[in-house]
Image (spheres, rainbow, N blue to C red):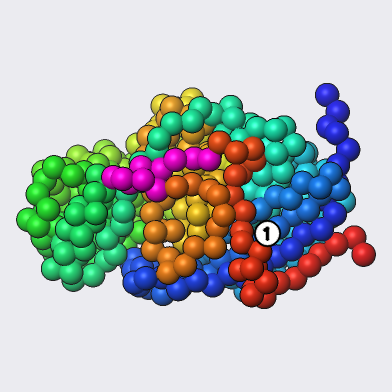
Amino acid sequence: MTAPEIKIELIEIYQSRIKLKAPFIISLGKFDYAENIIVKMICSSGITGFGECSPFMTINGESMDTCFIVGQYLAKVLIGKNPLLIDDCSQTMDAVIYGNASVKSAFDIALYDIASQFANQPLYKFLNGTNKILVTDYTVSINEADKMANDAQVIKDDGFKIIKVKLGGTKEKDIKRIKAIRNKIGNEIPIRIDANQGWNVNTAIEILNALSHFNIQYCEEPIPRWNFMQLSEIKKQSPIPIMADESCCDEHDAERLVALNACDLFNIKLGKSSGIFKALKIIKLAEQAGIMLQVGGFLESRLGFTASAHLALTSNNILHCDFDTPLMFEEDSIEGGITYGVNGTIQVPDKIGLGATVDENYLKQLTKVIVSKN
């Protein structure tokens, strides 16, 4: 069936820098601001689509500045394209430049926003998903053990039913951190741990075995991403399920990890997969292999996480959500989008399309570039 003839006529790219309420600290660095890119895509039909990415230099090798420049290359080749032909648009972006998955994801989200609006459906229905209440964890940044324990207590007091803990230091310090948290909050609330590639193979195995009685739901990316060939050995010796994160970016990574029997779970982030189009390929591979999934993100606002939430409604294999970072922002410029309820519950909008836009008064304050046919 031939796609209707509509065209992308204008693309606006914005730099959005928002201060966090407190520093977000992981083994790969400290972050005081969310430095994101917003894409606004306007079509000949009058439909406008929004997308967002949150580049991490230490994870996807991109920054707000590089995304702003590369985004202009992508915008120039997408002008005049039919936004409903998402496969074609994705291939066009890949033909322009290798990698740069973060900025490509912002364009991809805008394309899906347009396509689902054109279909007069909420994005999750356009993706053949079913609406349900999602539940997010909340993250404890890596720090001294007593500080992390106190932070975990605040999260528990705020009603969250799952706590994520950033690790990735020495064996002694990381075990001490988890013990301190458990002594503070008890053993009932599940803890998810994320080493962000901070351990070597032997350290990972030793720590995971030492933490076996602390109600740990799973461990994300225990070792450096380049050492993914050793993940299967950790999986074999760990009493705690292993989740691939930085080592699972696109469908090709997922296929390798399946072949290696390297992990129990994948963590999908749109900023790693180049967006929804390739994330759906990861989900299909996971379903075929019996691998469970989490959908997470970086430091996107509620705009980017609304796209992730729609994706999280598309498969029964998606068991976990990690959507807490918008709650860490000092300001919220998003209109519509996901809403946060009690106990970390998340409601996805039933409006057509993405169901989230950016306040125009906020956009007027930002550095931007406009790409059009002229």
Q: Residue at x 18, y 69 (%)?
A: 147
Rendered position, 73 above or below 92 = below
Q: Quadrant of the N terminus?
A: top right
Rendered position, 286 above or below 254 = above
Q: Where does residue 291 sit, x and y in percent of width and height? A: 40, 32
Q: Residue at x 49, y 40 (%)?
A: 348
Q: Where does residue 121 sit, x and y in percent of width and height? A: 65, 32
Q: Total marks drawn?
A: 1
Q: Residue at x 45, y 73 (%)?
A: 19
Q: Is residue 253 visible?
A: no
Q: Amino acid at mark 1?
A: Val
Q: Residue at x 10, y 60 (%)?
A: 180
The magenta stretch is 340-349
Q: Is residue 286 left or right of residue 324?
A: right
Q: Is residue 237 left or right of residue 181?
A: right
Q: Dot 1 corresponds to which residue?
A: 39
Q: Where does residue 220 sit, x and y in percent of width and height? A: 33, 50
